[in-house]
Amino acid sequence: MTTAAKTEANKDAVPAKRGGTPEQIKPHRIDVQFDESLPKHWFGDSAFLSHVLNTWTAIFPDAERYFVRWSKKALASVTDAQIKKDIQGFIGQETMHANQHEKLWDLLRAQGYNLDPVLWVVQKVAFDWIEKAMPDKANYALVAGLEHFTAMFGEIYFENPELMNKMHGEMKRLFEWHAAEEIEHKAVAYDQLMQIDDSYALRTGVMNLAVVGLYLITFGNAFYFMAQDRSLFNPKEWLTIADVFFGKYDLARKTLVKFLEYYKPGFHPWDNENYHLAQPTLAQYEKKAS
Ligand SMILES: [Fe+2]
Ligand SMILES: [Fe+2]
């Protein structure tokens, strides 16, 4: 079901002015500022947690520019007017995400981290060689698949405030804003793919590859950053990993359940009506802009 159709279906059920799905997708302006006062382990004093998100900060800009490239291309073949409008809003949001995360690269380098290997993997291997080797439809399916992850992580952000409150203030502002917009535009790449090719085999086949690639890069590079500041074999870090994934925060199971939703035949991102999680954050930026 398209975002437009979903909005129609939910119209009567949701009393708030903004319903269960976004009426209009547009970028919310932010200008994050970082300086050398940012601690190296800025997330709960944990190298692992900080470096998972530092890795995403390294890979998001190229990934998001890849999404933008394919969404601009999709505009030529998508005919649904609402989806076209959503795609334009999506392009605006992802462009801002890329620019805001990229601001951190120099600071991470100044802290002593080598970003070059992970940037080579995303810039050369993923978004040059693999992108060019794949058929167009597989690229659209990869954008939709990766967007399922960013929406999942956005939801996990808002569902786990006790954990997320451990972030350094400005980093929390960046990731919270990003998480909220990822939820808001979570159906756009999916609707775009459905307009181009709604094959179950295509979307799930590409997702099988996307999950392996994303996890390899995320954990591989997080451990590489940990090795760089000699925290890889620190037992405290491994206790945090166990607690976050299998203990108190139970994120391995929660993530798996959300991930598997994508494999349901007939799945649509707004089957999970979680827009309310993002709305308070988005409303803050709308208030500032008015
Ligand atoms: Fe994004
Ligand atoms: Fe996104």
Image (cartoon, rainbow, N blue to C red):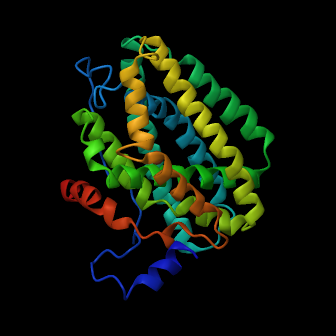
Q: Position of residue 61 (x, y in %)?
A: 50, 36
Q: Position of residue 194 (x, y in %)?
A: 66, 67
Q: What residue sits 32% from the left and 67% below the top?
A: 276
Q: Which of the 4 quarters of the picture holds residue 65?
A: top right
Q: Image check: 289 left or right of 213?
A: left
Q: Which of the 4 quarters of the picture holds residue 127?
A: top right
Q: What residue sits 43% from the left and 30% below the top?
A: 102
- Counting labels gives 0
Q: Nearer the viewer, residue 286 or 271?
A: 271
Vertical placement of residue 57 versus 83, above or below:
above
**Direction bottom: furthest residue:** 12
Q: Image check: 17 left or right of 89?
A: left
Vertical placement of residue 185 versus 35, above or below:
below
The quarter in which the C terminus is drawn is: bottom left
Q: Image check: 52 left or right of 126?
A: left
Q: Which of the 4 quarters of the picture holds residue 248?
A: top left
Vertical placement of residue 268 versus 117, above or below:
below
Vertical placement of residue 154 versus 169, above or below:
below
The quarter in which the N terminus is drawn is: bottom right
Q: Is residue 47 visible?
A: no
Q: Nearer the viewer, residue 231 or 52?
A: 231
Q: What residue sits 46% from the left and 53% below the top?
A: 254
